[in-house]
Image (cartoon, grey):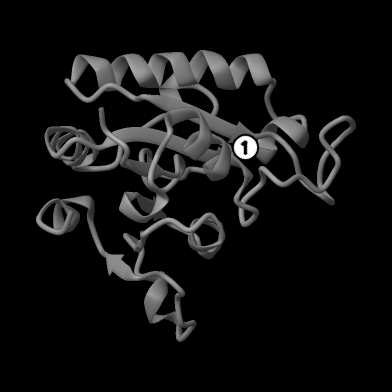
Amino acid sequence: MSNKAVFLDRDGVINIDHGYVHKIEEFDFMPGIFEFCQHAKRLGYKLIIATNQSGIGRGYYSENDFLKLADWMKAQFAENQCEIDGLYYSPYHPEKAQPPYLKKSDCRKPAPGMLLQAIKDFDLKPSDCIMIGDNETDIQASKAAGIGRSVLLDTVNKSNSGTESEADEVWQALSEGQAKI
């Protein structure tokens, strides 16, 4: 039994972040995502998605819309021989949401709640896990959960903005990461 996982943010890691993606026709997979995940699976990692989805709380789409898209997305991973083991999402936002989603939540990144729940649910060893995100909030959540390695996926070269990342590593593409996990 595997006690390690690769945690993946969704928008900006699994799919191109077009902003509040909630329809299949808007969903474009990131280049190399399936190959990267197949490689991780061969190395014995579980694949777990942890994603903030404040678009639900903001009323841009429903939780049902999100879950319908998530089911389709997971089916695409399964068809590509890299089944998703878990999916955790936070529909909350502390300032820009409608009730009941208008609240501070320990499961909204940068808080580590989603990661801690997955660690518990899958009996993971956090120090053997990896978090891949495209935002500092992903990295902060990873650090707070005790995840062994945090990776900032910087496909749009945000790291050259002069802001120092807390990430252990910065990758420009998922293909770069295949040799590093």
Quadrant of the image occupied by residue 71? top left
For image coordinates 40% across by 69% down, the residue present is 167
The residue where tag 1 is placed is 53
Q: In this view of the protein, which residue sits in the foreground, 150 or 121? A: 121
Along the viewing direction, whichever of 116 and 67 lies nearer the viewer? 116
Q: Quadrant of the N terminus?
A: top left
Image coordinates for residue 136, horizontal then vertical, percent: 52, 65
Residue under the image location 49 percent in, 57 percent down: 142
In the rendered view, tell whether residue 44 sits above or below residue 137: above
Tell me the residue at 31%/41% (across/down).
Answer: 4
73 and 18: which is toward the camera = 73
Which quadrant of the figure has residue 169?
bottom left
Up the image or down, 92 lies above or below 71; here it is: below
- Tell which of 6 and 162 is nearer to you: 6
Q: Is residue 150 left or right of residue 67?
A: left
Residue type at mark 1? Gln
Q: Is residue 36 left or right of residue 19?
A: left
**Is 49 situated left or right of 61 in this image?**
left
Vertical relation: 168 (above or below) 89: below
Q: Position of residue 115 (x, y in %)?
A: 52, 43
Few, some or many residues within 10 Å of mark 1 (<14, 14–19, 20+): many
Q: Quadrant of residue 44?
A: top left
Could you say whether the residue bearing mark 1 is in a helix, strand or loop?
loop
104 lies left or right of 52:
right
Q: Residue at x 55, y 26 (%)?
A: 22
